[in-house]
Amino acid sequence: MKRESGASDTSEAMTVPSNTAHGARHCDTSPLDYSLEKLWALVSSDMPPSDQHARQALEHLVVQATKTSLDKLDKAVAETFALLFWYRNEDMREALENRLNMPRLAPVRKRRLMYLVDRLRRFPCMKPEQAEQMKKLVTRWKDLAQDLNGKQVEKAQAVNRYDKVAATWGVSEPVSSLMSLVLDLQTRHFVDAHHLPNGYSQLATRPPHH
C-alpha cells in the first residue's frame, strides 16, 4: 500500500483521462467518454449527483468496471471508479447495490465488483466511516466467495498469489496491473493537492482493516 507525504500544490489541476478531456462534446465522443467526463467533474465538486445524467453515468461506470476481465479494464474507467469510490463513496453506494442485486447478473461479474470494493476499501485515503460501510457491504455479499468450488479458488490463488483479496473472491484474471493504475490517486499529496475529503487525518486512531 503506497503512501506519500508532502506539501500540497494547490495549483495542480485534477487531471482528466485523455479520452475524457473537458470541453464541448464532439460528435465522435462515445457514451462512455461522456459518462466519465461527467463523473470526473463530480469528483471535484461538492454537489450531489442530483441530475439524472450523473446517476446514469454512475450506473454505467459500475457496469463497465466489471463487464470484462479486470486485467483488460480501461485505464480511464479504473481511475474514475477508484476516485469516486474513495472520495464520493456515498454517491457510489446505490449504483453498487443496484448492480449486485441484479438476479441475472453472472456471479463472476458480481465477484469482480466485490473484489474492487473489498480491495479499495482498505486504502487509508478513505474516510473511516465510509470504509466501514463498505466492509458491511462485503459482509453482506460474502456468500459469493463462500459458494466458490475448490478449483475456482485454486486457480485464483495461482494467478493472484500476492493478492489474497482476489483469491478470496475467486478472481482468476491478473489484477496487479489494475492496482498500479490507481495507486497515485490515493496518496496524501494527491488528496491535498485536490482538496479531497479523506481519512488521513484520522489514520493514527483508526484500527487496521481486515
Image (tube, rainbow, N blue to C red):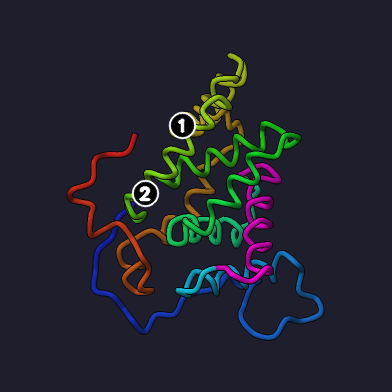
State which quadrant residue 175 falls in.
Answer: top right
- Residue 174 locus on image (x, y percent): 57, 38
> Which-is-in-front pick, marks 1 and 2?
1
- Please say if 174 is above or below 4: above
**Residue drawn 71% across the image and 64% down it:** 32
Question: In which quadrant is the C terminus drawn?
Answer: top left
What's the amino acid at mark 2? Phe
What's the amino acid at mark 1? Thr
- Please say if 70 is above or below 23: above
- Residue 170 locus on image (x, y percent): 57, 28
Q: Where does label 2 land, which residue?
A: 123
Whole-number angstrom distance, CA of label 1 to CA of label 2: 18 Å
**Bounds of the magenta span?**
49-70
The mark found on residue 199 in the picture is none
**Residue drawn 66% across the image and 42% down it:** 69
Q: Where does label 1 land, which residue?
A: 139
Q: Secondary structure at mark 1?
A: helix
